[in-house]
Image (cartoon, grey):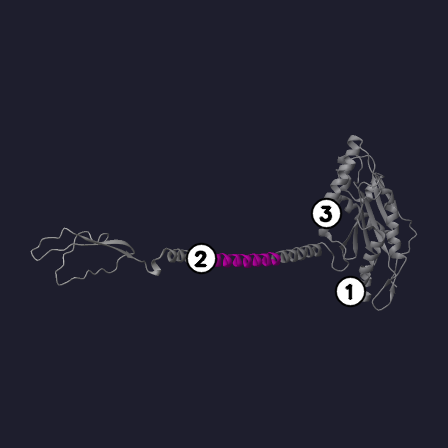
């Protein structure tokens, strides 16, 4: 079989059948030669052309279809995998978005709580006014600005605003211990709360209203001319004395207050010499002087006379009363005809 066998195949006379199996599809030539009984080969040769048709699964179209099917299956698998990955990505993005939104809400809540906590740490819980910690955190910047403005004016002749600087007011309720003794701490708290409201009606929102301790209040008037200090002190005194306080049981209680104040910088010529704490100390000493004089009044320091920085520091180490008597501290005071309160 040409195309299949590599050599002739001899067969006997009793087997006149040529059998081939598992032939691949294609064209073949079956060549046959015969011999006689004596073994002489015939010069004639028979050539039979044979074509083996491929089975259906061996056809080109089947193989192409199979390849196309395999390609379609691979494509389908890729698409399914891609769709799964995309769905997973969308799910992850949604989860990340939800988690991010939750974290943002949590962060905002924490920020609000932190701000509320910070605010509560700077606020007196009874009156809603500021406390000492607030003053410690903010007063340095205000004092430094005031010193800088006055120093520029003193050293370089720069223009100076009328309301440059600060005014420190210390306000104390007169005979407050008697309120707690006679009406209990609830009565005292009612007076303190109303006191805060009355001071808020006198001073501005931009001023610092501070519960300095117990029945004592500190007010830092900002951007207020020194010439208005006495007027503000009188208004604060009148706001307390002219209207009785209402207790929870409906009783009315007349009270007065004593006020000491000091303008800052204490020295306009040497603004950096005494620090702001010195101004508070001067206001406190003047407040005590008002107490000794009969209460229900005010006394304030508008500034010092011409002094050297060394002299200023020397006066700060001495009693304020000596400074006042020397005339080097410019002091204003309320009229002495005040009637101190004696309870209801």
Residue receiving disc 2: 72
Q: Which residues are magenta?
A: 73-102
Quarter of the image for residue 49 reads: bottom left
Query: Of label 3 and label 1, which has the lower sequence position?
Result: 3
Q: Which mark is residue 138?
A: 3
- Residue ID at (53%, 59%): 87
Q: In this rendering, would 256 be left or right of 133?
A: right
Residue count near mark 3 (Cα–Cα under 10 Å), binned few <14, some 14–19, many ≥20: few
Q: Residue furthest top?
A: 156
Residue 217, image x, y percentages: 79, 53
Residue count near mark 1 (Cα–Cα under 10 Å), binned few <14, some 14–19, many ≥20: few
Q: CA distance from mark 2 to mark 3?
A: 75 Å
Q: CA distance from mark 1 to mark 2?
A: 89 Å
For the residue pair 127 and 244, the one nearer the viewer reads as: 127
Query: Of label 2 and label 3, which has the lower sequence position?
Result: 2
Q: In this rendering, would 50 be left or right of 111?
A: left
69 in relation to 221, above or below: below
For the residue pair 112 and 19, the one nearer the viewer reads as: 19
Q: Residue furthest bottom?
A: 249
64 in relation to 312, above or below: below
Where disc 1 sits, the SS reads helix
Residue receiving disc 1: 185
């Amino acid at each position: 079989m040409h195309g299949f066998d590599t050599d002739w195949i001899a067969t006997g006379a009793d087997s006149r059948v040529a059998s081939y199996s598992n032939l691949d599809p294609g064209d073949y030539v079956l060549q046959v030669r015969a011999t006689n009984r004596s073994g002489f080969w015939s010069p004639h040769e028979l050539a039979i052309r044979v074509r083996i048709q491929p089975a259906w699964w061996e056809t080109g179209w089947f193989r192409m279809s199979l390849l196309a099917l395999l390609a379609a299956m691979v494509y389908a698998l890729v698409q399914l995998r891609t769709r799964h990955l995309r769905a997973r990505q969308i799910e992850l993005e949604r989860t990340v978005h939800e988690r991010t939104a939750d974290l943002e809400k949590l962060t905002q809540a924490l920020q609000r709580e932190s701000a509320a906590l910070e605010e509560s740490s700077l606020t007196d819980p009874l009156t809603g006014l500021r406390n000492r910690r607030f003053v410690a955190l903010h007063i340095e910047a205000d004092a430094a600005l005031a010193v800088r403005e006055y120093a520029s004016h003193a050293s370089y002749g720069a223009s100076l605003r009328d309301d440059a600087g600060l005014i420190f007011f210390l306000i104390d309720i007169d005979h407050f211990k008697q309120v707690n003794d006679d009406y209990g701490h609830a009565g005292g708290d009612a007076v303190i709360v109303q006191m805060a409201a009355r001071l808020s009606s006198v001073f501005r929102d931009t001023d610092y209203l501070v519960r300095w301790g117990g029945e004592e209040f500190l007010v830092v008037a900002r951007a207020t001319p020194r010439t208005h200090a006495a007027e503000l002190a009188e208004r604060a005194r009148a706001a307390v004395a002219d209207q009785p306080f209402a207790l929870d049981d409906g009783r009315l209680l007349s009270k007065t207050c004593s006020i000491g104040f000091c303008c800052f910088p204490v020295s306009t010529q040497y603004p950096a010499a005494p620090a702001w704490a010195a101004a508070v100390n001067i206001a406190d000493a003047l407040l005590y002087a008002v107490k000794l004089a009969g209460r229900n009044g005010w006394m304030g320091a508008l500034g010092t006379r011409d002094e050297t920085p060394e002299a200023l520091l020397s006066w700060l180490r001495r009693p304020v009363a000596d400074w006042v008597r020397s005339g080097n501290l410019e002091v204003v005071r309320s009229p002495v005809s005040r009637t101190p309160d004696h309870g209801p």
